[in-house]
Image (tube, rainbow, N blue to C red):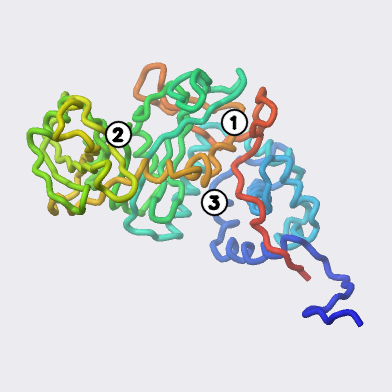
Amino acid sequence: MPPETPFDLKFTSREVTAWGGLALLKRMLDGMGFKEALKSWDLPQPGSNRGYAPEQLIEQMIVSIWCGAARFAHADITRLDSTLVRLFGWGKAAGHKAIVRLFQRFDQPSASRVQSSSYRWLFDKLQFNPITLDVDSTVLTRWGSQIEGGAKGYNPKNKGRASHHPLLAFVADWRLVANFWLRPGNTASSNNIEGFIESTLENLGATKVGLFRADSGFYDKTIVTLLKAKKISHIISARLTHALQQSIVDQCKWQQVEVGLEVSELSYQPHGWGTPQRLVVVRQHIKRKNGAVAGKTLSLFADDPDLQGWRYGAMLTGLEHSGAGGVAPVPRACRLREPDQGAQGGLWLGQLCVARLLGYRGGTGGDDAGLQLDECISPCRDAPKGASHSINAAPPGAGCGGTVG
């Protein structure tokens, strides 16, 4: 006799789908009032009375991503699964080209309006207060010659290649994206950062920012002035200029936190700034400290035997004085540069492709004014063999097996 199995094997007339676990996510969307929120965002409507409702297209794209879609064409995963269509109450599922046409109907004003409304709705639902807001930029290499906004700039991995240099803001406490602007590759990190911060605060709605963190690319007087005006506490990595290196050597009185790790603070007025700023300085000894050592050497004192072996990092902070050891250091690039994760990995940003940009975002002037990614996503063109042609997608396997009766 065959061995007994812990489950019954039998035929059934019920509809079966490999994505039956999405019933739980359907309940989540219903509990959040997602479909009602979509209707309130004034999405672009179809030009024909036979067109699909934009609310259905957005929901269908989200479900496709949950099912592992990595290209627009993969949205047919949901179209061909009649059980999923019935589960979400679509009546009839649209083809992937209908989703592409929806994004093509966006212009800059409507994209900005929908983006801001959706973010405010999300954060009002989550009710996180206060939050830690991390801001950073990254480099996205672009292949081919027809990528709008692609320009040659700082690109350490693919030197000489055109790229985009987007700005990102996200809630560090929960790893949620709070804002995203796409910009040409020749744009400086802090270009139009004031507009970006204002846009991010608008996206957050009633959510309070308890701490703003950024790396040295945002070490700028205008940023600090804006944050102080809005009474937002901040920690920003400072550039180790020669003047700052001299001040560190002259003023710092070091307090040991552990073997090979010391902290201090000083009052320093950068060139062109109107008032002195409080800086907290951390130094780590390459040989004495256990674990990885971050920071830079003081190039101005490279031959000083007392300073050799130490790596330094300075942080401009608006936090209240609590002793030199009472300020938490800025995490590396606000978690965007963790190994194989962050913007290029954990957020799947490297898979995002655009065929066109909707316009300038009103930068601070000059040729490097900021561009905004206005959710107009479409397959890449002129990319080399094996390059990504995908939309921003979740990893495969998001759905769970099961049946829906």
Observer-nearest of 65 and 291: 291
Q: Residues within 10 Å of mark 2 (few under 14, many from 20)?
A: some
Observer-nearest of 191 and 85: 191
What is the spatial separation of the Cα atoms under label 2 and label 3, in whole angstroms?
Answer: 40 Å
Query: How many numbered circles does the render carry?
Result: 3
Mark 1 lies on residue: 354
In-image side of 77 versus 191 (left or right): right
Q: What residue type is labelled 2?
A: Ser
- In the rendered image, residue 52, in percent from the top left (x then y), is placed at 72, 46
Mark 3 lies on residue: 40
Q: In which quarter of the image is residue 91?
A: bottom right
Vertical comparison of 11 with 18: above or below: below
Give whichever of discs 1 and 3 has the lower sequence position: 3
Q: Residues within 10 Å of mark 3 (few under 14, many from 20)?
A: few
Q: Is mark 3 on a helix, strand or loop?
A: helix
Mark 3 and mark 1 in contact (Cβ < 8 Å)?
A: no
Q: Quadrant of residue 245?
A: top left
Give whichever of discs 2 and 3 has the lower sequence position: 3
Whether residue 147 appears in this view of the structure is: yes
Whether residue 221 appears in this view of the structure is: no
What is the spatial separation of the Cα atoms under label 2 and label 1, in whole angstroms?
Answer: 28 Å
Q: Is mark 1 on a helix, strand or loop?
A: loop
In-image side of 381 versus 160 (left or right): right
What is the spatial separation of the Cα atoms under label 1 and label 3, in whole angstroms?
Answer: 26 Å
Residue 216 is labelled as: 2
Q: Which amino acid does label 1 sit on?
A: Val
Which residue lies at the image location 34% right of the left edge and 30% below the top edge? 190
